[in-house]
Amino acid sequence: MNHLAHLYLADDSPEARIGNLLGDFVKGVVGNQYPAEIKQGIILHRKTDAFTDSHFRTKSSRNLIRAPRRRFAGIIVDVCYDHFLSRHWSRYSRIELPEFASRVYDVLLEHREILPEKLRYMLPRLIKENWLSAWQNLSGVEKTLNRISARLKRRNQLVGAMEEIERNYTRLEADFLAFFPDLVVYARSYNAQLKAAFSAAKEP
């Protein structure tokens, strides 16, 4: 999943939101450089990514992407699924998406000093271009894919990948709508386990 889904799956606290976003920026072992709740968010992010990658519905979606873009199918599907989450946001949240995005931006600005350098560098553009709401329209999906393509070091086939999404739009949407409730259930269950484990670790 992409940024929006991870932020949605986080607990409603600044630390949890930050942690679930940092999963894309913090690699390797998560030491003690972050408070416990941020660390929990990073771990939850990684576990939900693993669950997503192994789910039969996301595999179905990736298999819709034709060669030579198949090697980038994971990226294409991740971005596309955030588009569907934003389109169907009212199914999953009582808070309107623009308000949710605004709250996230406020949290990131307030805690920018603890963000990784790469995220701090991206933050002004992320907010100015309203990335968290931009996925509602396919034009925003296309811009996101092109932006990711530009960041990759090697030449790639992400530019023009919108044709894969448009060609398979109905099937991709069906996969997402079947998959996302499973992800929510998994994330809530695993998050509860994380909280219990961290709480037990604090006990003398």
Image (cartoon, grey):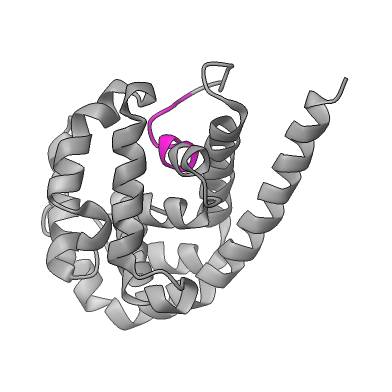
Q: Is residue 69 above or below residue 114?
A: below
Q: Which one is in front, 73 or 144?
A: 144
Q: Residue at x 28, y 21 (%)?
A: 117
- In the picture provided, is 17 more to the left or to the right than 152? right
Q: Residue at x 46, y 73 (%)?
A: 94
- Residue 107 in magenta stretch: no
Q: Position of residue 1 (x, y in %)?
A: 42, 54
Q: Position of residue 62 (x, y in %)?
A: 39, 62
- Residue 21 in magenta stretch: yes
Q: Position of residue 142 (x, y in %)?
A: 14, 60
Quadrant assignment, res 162: bottom left
Q: Which one is in front, 56 or 68?
A: 56
Q: Residue at x 43, y 57 (%)?
A: 5
Q: Position of residue 71 (x, y in %)?
A: 32, 49
Let me know if residue 161 appears in the view.
no
Q: Is residue 199 above or below residue 148?
A: above
Q: Which one is in front, 200 or 178?
A: 200
Quadrant assignment, res 189: bottom right
- In the picture provided, is 28 more to the left or to the right than 156? right
Let me know if residue 151 appears in the view.
yes
Per the rendered image, the range of residues in magenta is 19-27
Q: Name the image quarter holding the C terminus.
A: top right
Q: Residue at x 51, y 46 (%)?
A: 13
- In the picture provided, is 192 more to the left or to the right than 79? right
